Image: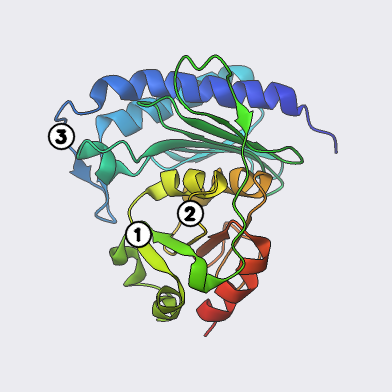
Amino acid sequence: MSHDLDQFVRTAHALADVAGAVIRPFFRSRLTASDKSDESPVTIADRMAERVMRAQLAELHPDHAILGEEFGLHGSTGGYQWTLDPIDGTRAFITGRPTFGTLISLSFEGRPIIGIIDQPVTGERWIGVEGRPTLFRSGFGQPSGFTPITTRPCSSLAEADLSCTSPEMLEDAPRPVWSRLKAAAKRVSWGGDCYAYGLLAGGHIDVIAECDMKPWDWSALVPVVEGAGGVMTDWNGQTLRHDGDGTVLATGDKSLHEAAVACLRS
């Protein structure tokens, strides 16, 4: 089936624009966060941003399904589905660190075909589209607009920079093998949430291994990473699925992926 990708890309950018307009005034405003059932923080900014994106989608693509972190699933999942995470990295957001982002994805029959990582404060934005190179905008008002980016060559774990958002997410890992990957890597950095995947796509990080990831956490990242030349799977090297085990492995160099999977297999 052919997709009107250009139209859908325009929609994705429009969603990022309206979400950013909602989020920016709340950044470093000392707003109050409440805890969700999984003890992760949520703010009024999350909820307002998702509402405005849902309202725009209802107008532009009323026949498309929507899955959002804050308000769940609306519509049938058999065809096109938008997946929204208004603020991925709420802990960073509420503590004034600009390493969070808005995630917007369009999937068709469960396969992500468009993904955006948007940093609404700095103006950085990554856009991945199936079959096209990943594009990056380095900030607001850039005269060059979006330019193609690629991952960097790194075929050896011994030379690789490894990243993970938080040691906490590894406490419930399906198997205690992350330490093997950590030991094999050159160095490890913590933090970043979705922002780290943008850095991997741009050639600054080599491998990211995380778990306890929901579809709204990873759907937008897949086209961005793959369009830049990287690979993104679960820890077993299998395609990410909505009913998967929540593990995510991203590598910038395809030859690095097999070695990383070998470390993470039980």
Label 1, label 3: how many angstroms apart (C-alpha)?
A: 28 Å
Q: Residues within 10 Å of mark 2 (few under 14, many from 20)?
A: many
Q: Nearer the viewer, residue 50 or 11?
A: 11
Indicate which disc, 1 or 3, sits on the residue closer to the N terminus: 3
Q: Nearer the viewer, residue 181 or 114?
A: 181
Furthest residue in direction bottom, as rendered: 266
Foreground disc of the pair 1, 3:
1
What residue lies at 52% left-to-right and 85% top-to-bottom? 266
Indicate which disc, 2 or 1, sits on the residue closer to the N terminus: 1
Residue wearing tag 2:
205
Residue wearing tag 3:
32
- Secondary structure under badge 1? strand
Residue 50 position, x and y percent, is 42, 30
Residue wearing tag 1:
189
Height in image: 138 above or below 115?
A: above
Model colouring:
rainbow
2 and 3 marks in contact (CB < 8 Å): no
- Identify the amino acid type marked 1: Ser
The answer, for residue 110, to whether it is visible in the render is yes
- Identify the amino acid type marked 2: Ile
- Identify the amino acid type marked 3: Thr
What residue lies at 60% left-to-right and 25% top-to-bottom? 146
Indicate which disc, 2 or 3, sits on the residue closer to the N terminus: 3
Furthest residue in direction right, as rendered: 1
